[in-house]
Image: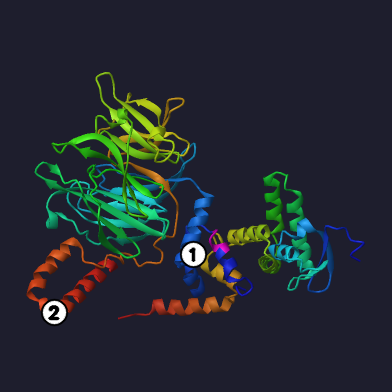
Amino acid sequence: MSNYIPQEVWIDILTRLPIETLIRCISVSKSWYSLITTPTFISQHLHRTTVANNDLLLVRNYSDNSKKEHYSLHFDNHTFDAYKTLDFPFMTPNHYFRVIGCSNGLLCLSDDQFCYNHTMILWNPSIRKYVNLPCPRVTFNSHGPFMHSIGFGFNVANNDYKVVRVVHLQEPWGYKAPPEVEIYELSTGSWRSVNPMGFPYVVGERSSQAFLNGAVHWVGHYPNELGGPSGSLIVSFDMGNEVFGVIMVPEGLSFPPLQSRVAVLEECLSMIHFTWSLYGDTCCVWAMKQYGVPESWTKQFTVDLKEGLRGVFGFRKNGEALMKKITSYREIDTLVSYDPKSEQVKNLGVTGSPISFYVDNFVESLVLLDLVNGEFGRQPNCGEKKMLKGKWKIEEEHEEQVVAESEDQTDERGKL
Amino acid sequence: MSSSLEKNMLILRSSDGEEFIVPEVVAVMSKAIKNMVEDECASNTIPVPNVDANILAMVIEFCKKHDESEAEAASDLKTFDSEFVNRGQEALYDLITAANFRDVKELLDALCQNVAEMIKGKSVHHIRIQFLGYQLFEILTSNFIWNIWCDRDFD
């Protein structure tokens, strides 16, 4: 009967289906398999889901006892209903990953939380597919101590996902100011260096990102003569043309430096600034109403950090702020939502260690469906490379053999 | 005949020769007919091949309702749509073919949504039988062979 319905109508019908049904549909017939796994279908499906907009929030939390990360999806509605729990398949010696960003249902994870470690993963939890990123070029082994920040985003122009890494090498008086910059593209599957064009600013250590208008934003600063920070500002990196930019912030936000973070509030770039004083800690939120116009910075609200409230770290669609609140249990916080108009605090019923929380908008998508799991980790991982290096010296004439071996190793890893 | 017809009326002729008189605003909800009217390559009677009288009547009913109810509440229209597309499979396929061929966007939208709802929550076998015309025995035999294969003793 499929002959009755033309192909383009089938595409129209299938793009309306939720992820679970589509995964089932893949095994219905060969023609449906090849239809659903094409990049065009994946982006059509993504487009339709984004337009329909189910307002999902991804929540990551963990408690230090369990040593297990917990990822779940919630509806961004009044009652914050749970939608589903996601299986987390990865392990790291650091116990926990750092979530870099989330774009079109694809998460970027890095285990650089506590030490120089270069495992990075792009993970689509909806369809349980992931890609291991190859080892970056600038590592501790190759360049010595450094400070880095990672950004992740989607480049609309060529329908590709990019990871950018900004590495400031350590120098006797601080950190080297034009940083080493490298970019990973999902389509090519490898890292390449980018010239930062004498970029004079420093991006903070493992700075959290805000992705907006096709650019990644971090809090950065201009180093003074002593190498220390002199006032914060926002550093942006455009994922399309791969150029750095800088956004000045109002005087009040700039000092003291390094006490702020960036976020997206109602489609605007916003900055959350913390002040600690004898009279009580506060957290104030500013938003840049017109992107790229420093005059349009406006103060939105200030939260007094009392009754166990910790800083704001994100926003919901209705403009409420997401905050952490201390509970009576040691090292366990609970996620709360703060309404700036009524100043009411609502418990969202998610608990975890204070540094564990990550909340971001989420869309269920089929991105990565056309790839084999772990496929792009073709280049040997950092540890393996070291192992291979010795061999390389001895068997320089058998270069092909070594390459073949390394590929075997990657294959084995893929199977695992 | 054209003199007796009001100015903004068109005649649509189905594949089996039946004629329908419809207001132009309703007829041009089909992009294909709209193009014909705009290019003035159509006389008063527009042939609609591949669509029989039965289906054409349904399509016209749908278009009329959508044309009239522009001011009406969207929820009313939604209930009408869901009732309209709730038909047997044969009629559904014929309607899809007609809507796709004549390029009636609203109708195609409602129909695709309906088919999507039908697919949701169905098992693979169910989808194969209902939508891809697999015969039950094919699935049973393939299952049978698969079971034998799985039960084989491999040592």
> Viewed as shown, does residue A416 lie left or right of B105?
left
Dot 2: within a 10 Å radius of its alpha carbon, few (fewer than 14), some, or many (20 or more) residues?
A: few
Chain ID for label 1? A
Q: Which residue is mark 2?
A: A398
Chain ID for label 2? A
Quadrant assignment, res A192: bottom left
Residue depicted at x 24% and y 29%: A256
> Could you say whether the residue bearing mark 2 is in a helix, strand or loop?
helix
Q: Quadrant of the N terminus of chain A?
A: bottom right
Dot 1: within a 10 Å radius of its alpha carbon, few (fewer than 14), some, or many (20 or more) residues?
A: some
Q: Which residue is mark 1?
A: A41
What secondary structure characterizes most of the magenta part? Answer: helix
Quadrant assignment, res A416: bottom left
| Residue A373 on the magenta span | no
Observer-nearest of A374 and B20:
B20
Residue depicted at x 26% and y 29%: A255
Quadrant assignment, res B83: bottom right
